[in-house]
Every structure is written in C-alpha cells, then in structure tokens.
Amino acid sequence: MAEGGARVELRGVGVRYANGTADAVHAVDLTIDAGTFAVLLGPSGCGKSTLLRTINRLVEPTAGTVLIDGADARARPATELRREIGYVIQAVGLFPHYTVAENVAVVPRLLGWDEARIRERVDELLGLIRLDPERYRDRRPRELSGGEAQRVGVARALAARPRVLLMDEPFAAVDAIVRASLQDEIARVHRELRTTIVFVTHDVDEALRLADRIVVMNAGRVVQNGPPDDILERPADDFVRELVGVDAETRRLALERPLIER
Amino acid sequence: MAHLGTHVALAGTALVVALALGIPLAGLTADRAWPRAVLLALAGGFRVVPSLAILMLALPLLGLGFGPALLALVVLALPPILVNTDVGLRSVPRATLEAARGTGMTERQIGLRVRWPLALPVVAVGVRTATVEVIASATLAAFIGGGGLGDYIVGGLQTSDFSELLLGAVSVALLALAADSALALTQRKLAI
C-alpha cells in the first residue's frame, strides 16, 4: 500500500434498518477527494456514524454504492477491505489481553507481515503518535490513560498504512485539554501522511478546527458540503445556521480565553 | 485406594463430559435469543433438582452403578459451566468486538483471538465451581453402587462405624480442596 490517500465516493448510499420504517441514511451522494480531511458533522441520530460505517462495510448500504479509488467496496470480502481502512472509535476498543505493541500489530499480523517488519513498524508508529516505544511497547491497555489509549487506537488504525482512515467521534470521551492535544496530533499526522480521513463529530469547534471539508448532516441527509469558511459564512439553510451560528459565537469567545478554560 | 481411584475417575469423567457438552453449547447459544433463553432455563432447572433425585430417577433407566452416577454428576456440573461460559462471552465489551471487526478480523478470528480469550477467566470460575461440586457430590454414587469414597460413608453409616464415616468425609473434603486450590492457581494465571 502506498502512502497518501484514496478517493472515497458514495453514490446514492441509503441505509434502512430491517426493523425501521424511516431510512437511517437517505440517498447520499458524496465525493471525498484523495488526501482530504473530511468531517461529517451533525446532531446525534442524524446518520453520520451509520454513513461512516458503510465505507468499511460494518454497515451494508441497502441502496447505492461505495467506491474507493473507483473500486466498488463490495467487489471483495469485507474483511479484506477493512484491513486497508483504518478505523478508530470513541470507546477505543483496545484488546485488553494484548500489549500496546500487540494491539498496534493486529492488522499487520492479519496481513501476514514478518515479525521483524512488524516490530519496526510498531516502534515507528509509537514514535509518530509520540509515545516512547521503550516505555509503552509492553504496557497493557489498563495501564494507559484515556488519551494514551486513544493514541494507541490511532496507531493501530494506521499500522498497515491505510489510504483511508475512518474516525467515529474519536476524542469525545476525553477531557478538553487531552482532546485539544489529540486534535493537534491527528492534524499533524494528516499533514505528514496525507491519508484521506473521514471523521465523525457532533462538535462544531472540532469540525472547524480539523476539516478541509465539512459535510453537515441532518435526518439522514447531507444538508451542506463545503470548506469550513463556506459553512460559517454561507450556511445553506436554517438548520446549518443554527448549528454553526450559536457555536461560532461561543467559539470566537472561547478563542480569546486561554486553552485551559476551553 | 481403589475407592479414591473410582471417585476421581467418576468426578473426572463427569467434568470432561460436562465441559465437552457445556462450553460448545453455551458458545453456540450466546448470541441467539431463543436458544439462549432455553439453555439458561435448563441450567436453572438442573441447578435446583437435587442430585440425589437425579440419581434415583436415573435408576430405572440406567440401573445401578457407574452409569447413572455419571449422568447425575454431569447434570450437576453443567449449570455453572453453561452459565459462566454464557456470561463470559457476553461480557466482552461491544467496543472491543466492534474494534476487532473494524480491523478486518474474520468472525472466526474474532472468536479465537479476542472473544474466547477474554471470556476464559469467567469460564474458569465456572469450571472451578463445577469441579468442587462434582467431587463433593460423587459421594452420592455410593448409594446406587457407583463406588468411590462415598462407600466409606455409606459403610460407616450402616455399621455405625464413626471412624470409617470420617475417613470418607475427610478424604472427599481434602480432594475437593486440593482440586480447588489447583484451579485457583490456574485461574490467577488466566487473569488479564
């Protein structure tokens, strides 16, 4: 797998759950260019996580097609696809019976890399997310703080050099200071690797801080898709205006105060 | 010594059979609502039926001896194994399984590398409970001619020989304690 990102295209993607009458996601058309940091922003229940999970087929769309660099995601086994797409979740989900190094090595092992290459890659990744390999390699997840655990979660997702990284509210469970530093880290990692990142959040500040493009969702539909400036200055409708408007006020105020109070 | 041998053979066989039945069965039903409800109801049922009653019920079907005693002990050993396997598998956090799926593990790999290893400490507690119960209850086999250390107790009761009765009771207790300590050690090694 090469460095850099892949283009992700959703064509008419819909998700209807077996028991549901309403669609969780309704005919979404969305193109995310290679190397873009795209943020899916919206209130809880708007379908943003469901939409994200159609990209690595943890949710199978009931309508439409997902294309990764032009190739239909359904063209090969879901497990094979997922090994080439990083996935980070809010609850982190590190394997408690594995060390940090073993957690990071999960996907390379699934792909059958040799042990020397895996060891080298693990240290490289721990360096990338700024955890000293000597100190952290052999720790267990229960010995990590929330912020450290999520760094390892990110390292695990990046281990096999995926060209797409999916992040589902990854920093929502940590406190504000740690969140800010994790946001800095992921922004830096994105600058270094140019991986295509699709990042789900309900936090407008976070979206504005990280995104090249913001995709605003409401009730299973995309209501606006554009660069952060556009979303702030030219909200497409009242929903978007209200979503960013109130928060834009707070954000301006917040920026005038030191980080620690945010 | 022959009594001790029979006792260990009886308890050991009962445990092996209960493990071989219980663990896969609970594994199969853990994620299926209906089968799981049936299994847990059965486990609850088995738990409240006194082993002596099962022993007596087995008599007309299997006759006297090792066979019916074994059946009664398997029934006795199953509930803790079934319930703990079920609880162990279901207590693996959803996030852990979601993350495992997200890395591209197959369902089989998720089971072998993540779910079962994480369930194992809880399963081990069930095995330990079952072991102690089976060793203690194998004593009852003597009542239907199944042999074992219970023979001392039955014999002691019939002849009012207190020391013989005591020999049986104490040796059963020691055997159960020894097995329990051995399993406690193993369990500590499994802890995550």
Image: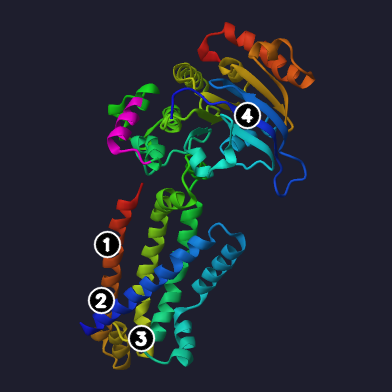
* Residue B23 visible: yes
Pointer 3 local density, CA inside 10 Å: few below 14, some 14–19, many at least 20: some
3D distance between C-alphas at marks 4 and 1: 58 Å
Residue that extends furthest to the top in the rendered view of this protein: A256
| Labels 4 and 2 share a subunit | no
Going 34% across and 76% down the picture, which residue do you hit?
Answer: B13
- Give the quadrant of the C terminus of chain A: top right
Between disc 3 and disc 1, the foreground one is 3
Pointer 4 local density, CA inside 10 Å: few below 14, some 14–19, many at least 20: many
Residue tagged 2 = B171
In this picture, residue B155 sits left or right of residue A249: left
Say whether marks 2 and 3 touch (CB < 8 Å): no
State which tag comes first along the sequence, 2 or 3.
3
Image coords of residue B181 (percent x, y): 28, 62
Q: Which residues are magenta?
A: A112-124
Q: Is residue B1 magenta?
A: no
| Labels 4 and 1 share a subunit | no
Q: Is label 4 in a helix, a strand or a loop? A: strand
